[in-house]
Amino acid sequence: MGVGNRAPLPGEFALIRKYFAPLAAGFSGALDLEDDACTYAVPAGHELVLTADALVEGRHYLGTDPADLIARKMLRVNLSDLAAKGAKPVGYLMTTALGPDIDEDWIAKFAAGLAADQREYGLALMGGDTVATPGPTTLSVTALGIVPTGRALRRRGARPGDRLFVSGTIGDGILGLKVLRAELLELGSNHRDALADRYHLPQPRVQLGAALLAGGAVTAAMDVSDGLVADAGHIADASHCGLIIHADRVPLSPAAQEALAEDLDLLPVLLSGGDDYELLFTAGAGFTAPGSGTPVAEIGAVVSGSGVKVLDRDGVEIPLTVGGWQHF
Amino acid sequence: MGVGNRAPLPGEFALIRKYFAPLAAGFSGALDLEDDACTYAVPAGHELVLTADALVEGRHYLGTDPADLIARKMLRVNLSDLAAKGAKPVGYLMTTALGPDIDEDWIAKFAAGLAADQREYGLALMGGDTVATPGPTTLSVTALGIVPTGRALRRRGARPGDRLFVSGTIGDGILGLKVLRAELLELGSNHRDALADRYHLPQPRVQLGAALLAGGAVTAAMDVSDGLVADAGHIADASHCGLIIHADRVPLSPAAQEALAEDLDLLPVLLSGGDDYELLFTAGAGFTAPGSGTPVAEIGAVVSGSGVKVLDRDGVEIPLTVGGWQHF
C-alpha cells in the first residue's frame, strides 16, 4: 500500500480498529476482532448453513459503484443463498484485498454499507482479514445462517407433478445492468432508476425462505443468481427431473414489461439474465404461498426426464441461445 | 479468463466438478457442492471456532511457488489460528480469484495439495466460489473448528505471575524467506533446505493446542504469525499486562543457531520475523507441558504494566527496531 495518487491508508490493525471492530461490537464471540478467530454457539436444535462468495472489482461490480452499495450487494448476494436454504442469517466473515485506488473514504463508505445491512438483517461481523493487492479489489464473504437441524431447503427433491414457483419479478437485474451501461435509453427515467436500483441492491428473500421452510411443502429451492433458466437447470439436474417454464407466467416488473414491449427480443435476456436474487422453488399439491410480503407466482411444473423447456403461451418451445449468467 | 499464453481454463462449473467436488466428497453437508450453501451440525456440547485469511500472489506467496505447497500453506496458516484456540479442525470454505497465469495444471496441483492436507488434518471442503481476476491470484479461506462450549483459548487472560511459553522453534519462517530470496548463502545446504521447507510448509500445532485446552492451566494463547515480539504484544494488549521475554531462552532450530552464529545481527530478525506458526501462551503455576510431541519452552513471564520487553542473558533490554511482520 501507500503508492498511487492518494493519501496512504492506515495499517491493517488501525483499519480494523477504526472501521471493522465496531461492526463486530454486537457479537461477543468476535472478541472485538482482537483474536484471529471467533467463537459461535449454534442454538440447540439447529445446524449451520454456510455459503461463500468472491467479488472482483471490474467483474462483479464496477470500480465506480458507490462503496456502500458494493458492501450491501455483497452481503445480500450471500443472504440470498441463505434464504434459498430457508436459513435465518447470523453473521459473516469477510476478507478484503484492497487495490491501489482504495482510500480511507472508500473504506468508511464501505463500512457504513455493511453497518446498514447488518442492522437491516440482524447480522454481525464475526471475523476476517484485510490485505493489500496491486490488482483489482477482491472481496470474499462467508455467511452463516441457522436452520432447524435436517430441515434446510435443497436443490434436490423436486418430483414430477410438483409445481414450479418464483418470487418477486425476474429480469430486473440484467436490465439494470443494461441501464448502467447506457442501454435501454428509450425507457422512462423512473423505470431506468428502478432497474438500476434493483441491480445495485438486491432484495434477498430471507423472510420468504424461512416461511417456505416452515410451511413444509417445498421440495426443492434455490435462488436465481445465474439466470432463471440456468438456475432451473440446476434444480432439474440435482433432482433428476425436467422442468417446464411458461414464459408468459414469469412475473415481470412494470419496468421490465415496458422494456419488453419496446423490444420483444429482450425476452430471452430476461429469462437468462442473472442477478435477480429471487427464490425459485418446487412444491407439492398442498402448497399455499406464505404471507411473507413477497409475491409468489406459479410459472411451471416438474416433469419426468431432464433439462428445462421454456414454452410460449401457445405451448411452443422458445429456443434460448443466450446462456446463463456464468460469473466465471 | 481465456486470455494469455495458455490453454483456456474450463468454466467455473467444470472446474468445480473436476477438482473441487472430490474434495467435498467426504462431507455430506456440502451436498457435492451442488448447492450454493452447505450445512453443518456442531456436535453437542461444542461451539464453533471460525477464522478467515486472504492470500495474494506476490505478497503472501510467490507466483513461482509450487501450487500444492501454496494450497497446504494456506490451509495450515488457518489451522494454526484454530490451534491457538485449542480447536479441533473440521473443514473450510474457500474462494479463489484465479489470475491470467493460472492453467489447469496449476489447479490440479493446487487441488492435490488441498487433498493431502485434508487427509493429514481430517478436514473437508465445505463450499466456496471460483472466479477469474485480471490481477494476481487471490485466495481466501474460512476455516471451521470446534471446541467444548466456552472453553476456547483466548488472547486475554494472562495474569501477572504467569509464565510465558512457546512451542517448537522461532525464526525459521523469516530465515526460510531469506533463503528463498538467495540470502544466507553462507549456510550449509541442509540448513538452507530445512529453512525453506519451514517457510513453505508450516506445522500448525493442532495437537498441542487441543492438549493445552484440555490441560486447563493456560491463561492466554495465540499463534506466532506476525513475529514473536509483535504477537507477544497482542497478548499483552488483550490481557492488559506486560510480558518479559528472555532472548536466550527462545528456542532456535539448528539452522537458526548456525545463522545466528554467522551474524549476531540476525537476533532481532528472528524475534520479530513472522510465519513461525508456533503457539505462544501463558500459564499459571500448575502448568506442565503436555506430551503432544511438540516441545515447549518457557521463555519469560507475565508482569503488571503493559508492552513487551526483550532481555538479554544479563537482563539488559534489547532494543528492537525491526517491526513485526505486518501482512498488510
Image (cartoon, coloured by chain):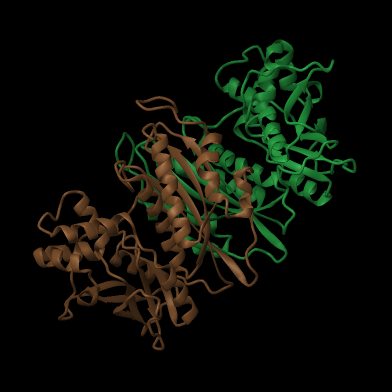
Chain colours: A brown, B green
- Position in image of residue B306 (x %, y %): 73, 31
Residue that lies at the very extreme toward the right in this rendered image:
B286
Q: Residue at x 80, y 44 (%)?
A: B218
- In this picture, is B143 found above or below A42? above
- In this picture, is A199 found above or below A312? above
Q: Quadrant of the N terminus of chain B?
A: top left
Taking the image as shown, residue B305 lies to the left or right of residue A299, namely: right
- Position in image of residue A307 (x %, y %): 31, 71
Q: Is residue A225 visible?
A: yes
- In terms of image quadrants, where is residue A236? bottom left
A232 or A172: nearer the viewer: A172
Taking the image as shown, residue B14 lies to the left or right of residue B195, namely: left
B322 or B292: nearer the viewer: B322
How many numbered circles are shown?
Answer: 0
Residue that lies at the very extreme toward the front in this rendered image:
B305
Q: Residue at x 77, y 17 (%)?
A: B317
B54 or A303: nearer the viewer: B54
- In terms of image quadrants, where is residue B286? top right
Q: Residue at x 31, y 41 (%)?
A: A63
Taking the image as shown, residue B260 lies to the left or right of residue A52, namely: right
- In terms of image quadrants, where is residue A43? bottom right
Q: Is residue A126 visible?
A: no
- In this picture, is B48 found above or below A283? above
Q: Residue at x 33, y 60 (%)?
A: A226
- Position in image of residue A87 (x %, y %): 50, 68
- Position in image of residue B140 (x %, y %): 50, 44
